[in-house]
Structures are given as structure tokens and as C-alpha cells.
Amino acid sequence: MQANLHHYLSHFKWVTYLDYPPPANHQSLMNSSHGLIALGALILALGLILSYAPWLLSWFGKLPGDIHIENKHSTVFIPISSMIVVSLLLSLLLNLFFRK
């Protein structure tokens, strides 16, 4: 009986609480930390532009195709064309800097 139980239990891989979470890959941590640093630098640059050179972004929301609806109780602003321009610029910049 004990031999059968030992044979039955030998098919299972015993997992302890020490096995979880699995060890982190150092390379993936480095990639995510570099991404967070780049995101912080981007937010800092945008903040500096908005503080010291607001005329650089004065076009945002004033392009043809941007929807602005005003009611006496509410305002709706949907910058479709402006977001397309921002998306194209970001795609161009990211492809230039991160191309392998």
C-alpha cells in the first residue's frame, strides 16, 4: 500500500510558497525602468513647453475636424484632427529613435 502511494505521489511536482512568484528576469526589469524614465522625461518636457512656450501648442484643438460643441449648460470638445497629427508625430519620432 505504501509503495503504491509513493509511486502515485512521485508523479506530482510539489510546489511550495517559496517557488512563487517566479524569479524576475533582470532584462525585462531594465526595459521597464528605461521606459518609465523616458515617460517621465516626456512628461517633464511637455510641462516645460506648456509653462515657458505655450504658443508651440496653440494649434491644438483649432484644426479643421476638431469638434467643439457648446451648450448653455455644457461643453463638449473632441479634438479628432489634432489627435491624428499628434499620433503621426509620435509614431515618426518613436520610429526614428527606437528602430533597430
Image (cartoon, rainbow, N blue to C red):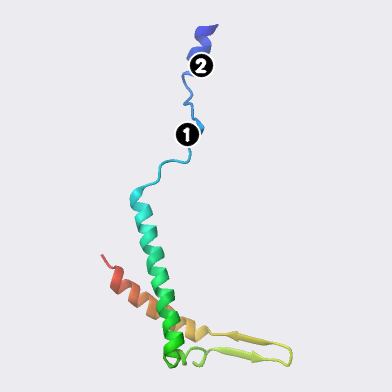
Residue farthest top in this picture? 1
> Could you tell me the amino acid type at mark 1?
Leu
Write down the residue under mark 2: 8
Taking 86 as reference, is 41 above or below it? above
Position of residue 28 in the picture relative to residue 73 (left or right): left
Residue farthest left in this picture? 100
Q: Nearer the viewer, residue 49 or 74?
A: 49
Q: Secondary structure at mark 1?
A: helix
User: CA separation, marks 2 and 1?
Assistant: 24 Å
x 37%, y 47%: residue: 25
Q: Quadrant of residue 38?
A: bottom left
x 54%, y 89%: residue: 66
x 48%, y 14%: residue: 7
The N terminus, quarter of image: top right
Taking 7 as reference, is 82 above or below it? below
For the image, the number of numbered tags is 2
Neighbor class of circle 1 (other Cα within 10 Å; few <14, some 14-19, many 20+) is few
x 40%, y 46%: residue: 24
Q: Nearer the viewer, residue 71 or 51?
A: 51
Q: Nearer the viewer, residue 46 or 72?
A: 46
Q: Nearer the viewer, residue 70 or 31?
A: 31
Residue 68 is marked as: none
Write down the residue under mark 1: 18
Q: Quadrant of residue 72?
A: bottom right
Q: Position of residue 100 (x, y in %)?
A: 25, 64
Q: Position of residue 14 (x, y in %)?
A: 48, 26
Q: Secondary structure at mark 2?
A: helix
Residue farthest right in this picture? 73
> Could you tell me the amino acid type at mark 2?
Tyr
* Label whose residue precedes the other's in the sequence (2 or 1): 2
Neighbor class of circle 2 (other Cα within 10 Å; few <14, some 14-19, many 20+) is few
